[in-house]
Amino acid sequence: MPRDWDAFYRNAREDRPPAFVVRAYGPFVPQGPVLDLAGGLGRNADYFLQRGHPVVLVERSREALRRLSGTPGLTLVALDLEGAGAPEGLPQGPFAGIVMAYYVNRPLLQGLAPLLLPGGLVLVEGFSRKEALRRGRPQSPFYWEGEELLTPPPGLALRAFGEGWMEGYRVYAVYLRP
């Protein structure tokens, strides 16, 4: 689904609430820095900043990064998570939490455990394949398969999972680094 993300963020609202998984499980992220992958305009980063966590937000859109520039406690990293230099270009942490909301990158998800502190959490949320079908995009790779997130990435343990209708068919998972 190629998209002009700069154009998208040029007109996007900044007042959107954080993802459900962040609102529900963010309080369980231990104190320490949080990594927000494909963080957009920082709706999830803002949640953690308000709770005293320093946040590193990774985003490829120069427009989104421009709009977030100067936010106290927020470190911005310009990186295309699907391009050359990723995942090598990711900040190495260690992080108390990692957020991957509405961004599907299966290989990246599989390699997140080494970036987490012991006891740290990975919070994942996105649309499910049912939503792809509802939107007429049955072949799109940008949706999580049914129950796909039940299998934790290497080095992580599943702590929470949910799937169903939440103003669209959505799925979330919370993983813990033991």
Image: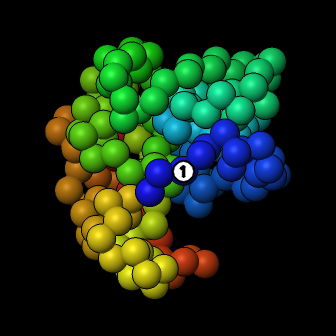
Q: Position of residue 58 (x, y in %)?
A: 54, 28
Q: Is residue 142 above or below residue 69?
A: below
Q: Is residue 120 left or right of residue 17?
A: left
Camera-nearest residue between 75 and 134: 134
From this viewpoint, which residue is outermost toward the bottom?
134
Camera-nearest residue between 159 and 85: 85
Q: Name the element at disc 1.
A: loop
Which residue is at a point 54% across and 31% down the rendered structure image?
Answer: 60
Asked which colour scheme the image uses, the reply is rainbow
Q: Three-letter amino acid code at disc 1?
A: Arg
Q: In which quadrant will I find the C terminus?
A: top left
Q: Is residue 55 left or right of residue 110?
A: right
Q: Is residue 34 left or right of residue 110?
A: right
Q: Position of residue 130 (x, y in %)?
A: 38, 80
Q: Is residue 58 left or right of residue 119?
A: right
Which residue is at a point 46% across and 44% down the rendered structure image?
Answer: 100
